[in-house]
């Protein structure tokens, strides 16, 4: 009987370590950019606009994947629809593919639309400082698609409030893994006491 308890304890400990390692490794290595060219990034984006960063707010702050809301004052729209003040959400850190923007810009923002909320963007989507060559390339892509170039943004604001952070299942798994490890320790201790 003690041998069975020890075997169960070892299996539980292994499962706890695998779960904890899987969660942490997934978070740490989540961002890997494939290096798409600007035309591909333009095609994938629902909205492309130029603007200055007005504010940045992180909801949570405990994890690199917590949502960060970037609010831009939009100067020109090259694809899709954007408002004069447009919110864009990404992960808080580049470690989780979040936008890495220094200063207030101007920036060219490549984003995806979301129903009833701010647009989404990530580190690999094309968002970058609005260098003259990049702006010229995006202008040409916009003209080729038949979109109006340098259109004034819509009045008003859209997606400039950050909602509560979504449920973090990774945290639940880490706590569960820690619980399994504790249970395993208790079973091993109990097994040793029975032998002694």
Image (cartoon, rainbow, N blue to C red):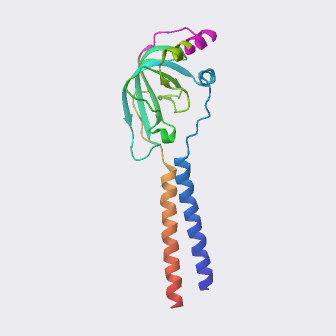
- Figure quadrant of the N terminus: bottom right
Q: Tell me residue 124's x, y (percent).
A: 55, 32
* Picture quadrant where residue 86 is located: top left
Residue at (42, 40) in percent of width and height: 164
Q: Tell me residue 185's x, y (percent).
A: 49, 74
Q: On screen, 11 above or below 19? A: below
Disc tally is 0
User: Does residue 142 appear to the left or right of 175 in the view shown?
Assistant: right
Regarding residue 149, the answer to whether it shows in the image is yes
Residue at (57, 23) in percent of width and height: 46
**9, 124: nearer the viewer:** 124
Residue at (58, 39) in percent of width and height: 32
User: Does residue 10 appear to the left or right of 98 in the view shown?
Assistant: right
Q: On screen, 90 above or below 10? A: above
Q: Which residues are magenta?
A: 137-155
Q: Tell me residue 149's x, y (percent).
A: 53, 8
**Is residue 151 highlighted in magenta?**
yes
């Amino acid at each position: 009987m003690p041998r069975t308890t020890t075997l169960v304890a070892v299996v539980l400990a292994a499962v706890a370590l695998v779960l904890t390692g899987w969660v942490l490794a997934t978070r740490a290595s989540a961002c890997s950019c494939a290096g798409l060219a600007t035309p591909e990034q333009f095609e994938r984006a629902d909205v492309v606009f130029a603007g200055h960063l007005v504010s940045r707010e992180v909801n949570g702050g405990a994890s690199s994947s917590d949502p960060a809301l970037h609010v831009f004052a939009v100067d020109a729209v090259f694809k899709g629809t954007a408002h004069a003040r447009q919110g864009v959400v990404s992960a808080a850190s580049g470690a989780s593919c979040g936008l890495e923007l220094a200063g207030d810009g101007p920036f060219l923002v490549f984003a995806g639309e979301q129903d009833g909320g701010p647009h989404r963007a990530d580190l690999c989507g094309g968002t970058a400082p609005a260098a003259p060559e990049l702006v010229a390339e995006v202008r040409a892509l916009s003209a080729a698609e038949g979109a109006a170039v340098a259109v004034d943004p819509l009045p008003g604001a859209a997606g400039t409030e950050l909602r509560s952070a979504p449920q973090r299942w990774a945290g639940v798994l880490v706590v569960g893994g820690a619980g399994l490890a504790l249970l395993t320790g208790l079973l091993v201790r109990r097994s040793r006491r029975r032998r002694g």
